[in-house]
Image: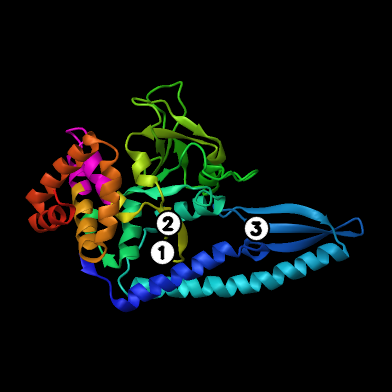
Amino acid sequence: MDKLPLETQTLYAEMMEQLVAREAHRSMGHASGCFTTKDIKGASYYYFQYSDPGGVQRQVYIGRKSNELDRLVERYNAEREAFRVDEDHIRRLCAQLRAGGALITDTASARVIKSLAESGVFHLEGILLGTQAFTVLGNLLGVHWKRSAIKTHDIDIAGESKMRIALPNIRADIPKALESLEMGFIPVPPLNPKASSTSFKVRGNPLRVDFVTPETKQGENNPIFISRFNAAAQPLRFLDYLIDNPVKAAIVDGGGVLVNVPQPARFAFHKLIVSRERELTAHDKVEKDIMQTAQVISVLADERPGDLLLAWDELKRRGKGWIKRAEVGMSVINRSDPSVYKKTVELLGL
């Protein structure tokens, strides 16, 4: 694990500012496409032409040409030019970040995450989890993780069954967003044939998208349909701790994508806990859990110890069972990375 150069960290901060500002000032110009006209029986009609995430060209009828629609088109073209300038700047920043050693999200995963973002998933409190989030957290914390800890083809998205703040008439159709990519995503059949699928996979390819939500009743296994995503999610124990108060971050590929990810300290402690819950056959996943935890804790203990203390205080409020699992996980870290274990134990007063 190495620190990213200060110049790279500064570039990432600048890209985050650009993405957050773009999100806060979304306008017509953000819509990808162009207005076109068709002459039908002596009259002109406006259509909006665009390509969906799968590259298929579509046209939407707008209306008969008029002074009002002419002004709308003029406004779109003006805002589109301003948006293009912003997009070009973000692409240049991504190229500089790549050259500066930032962690890059693989092309296929980035394409899927971008499609989900454009559908509104992260605007509707969706949260990127797993190793994809771990990659993002590296750039956010200004470090380059060990490559062996970031190999994955899974994209995990979490969301509460209900939003904290209701946004009427706003939906993100996840199955449609995946289908429009034309990458071959199909629902993974659940073990219970009467239950809804919570996963989508590309046949013959390791790329997979899983949707999860916090368990509200102990032992709950049946998928929960989340209407704002038009998709079902698998309930998981301990997930509520992980996704509480997420932070904004960005994936880096050819262009930045703004996403929500867990707080780094909660990410680390949650990994400790779930590593104790995995089956004996999941040795590789347990090893990756511990490796990722050790790296995140090492950075936070040196540079943001208060984050660890706050996340640990919240974990302790969850009960003795949570503490025991985390402490057992820490003992495993002691075997693989005694220095990280020592400074964590001293910091937390264990």
User: Farthest right residue?
Assistant: 42
Q: Quadrant of residue 106?
A: bottom left
Amino acid type for the residue under numbered disc 3: Tyr
Mark toward the start of the polypeptide (2 vs 3): 3
For image coordinates 46% across by 21% down, the residue present is 194
Q: How far across and down, in percent of the image, does residue 210 sit? A: 40, 40
**Does residue 18 appear to the left or right of 70 in the view shown?**
left
The answer to whether marks 1 and 2 mark residues whose Cβ atoms lie closer than 8 Å is yes
Residue 278, visible in the rendered structure? no
Q: How far across and down, in percent of the image, does residue 345 sit? A: 13, 52
The disc placed on residue 253 is: 1
Please determine whether, in this image, residue 207 is positioned above or below residue 136: above
- The foreground one among 193 and 166 is 166
Look at the numbered disc 1 and give the secondary structure of its residue. Answer: loop
The disc placed on residue 110 is: 2
Mark toward the start of the polypeptide (1 vs 2): 2
Residue 34, visible in the rendered structure? yes
Which residue is disc 3 drawn over?
50
Q: How far across and down, in percent of the image, does residue 164 sit? A: 51, 43
The CA distance from mark 1 to mark 3 is: 23 Å
Please determine whether, in this image, residue 22 is positioned above or below residue 157: below
Q: Is residue 41 magenta?
A: no
Look at the numbered disc 3 and give the secondary structure of its residue. Answer: strand
**Is disc 2 surrounded by few (<14), some (14 to 19) or many (20+) residues within 10 Å?**
many
The disc placed on residue 28 is: none
Q: Give the range drawn in magenta.
A: 268-289
Amino acid type for the residue under numbered disc 2: Ala
**Is disc 3 surrounded by few (<14), some (14 to 19) or many (20+) residues within 10 Å?**
some
Image quadrant holding the N terminus, namely bottom left
The CA distance from mark 1 to mark 2 is: 7 Å
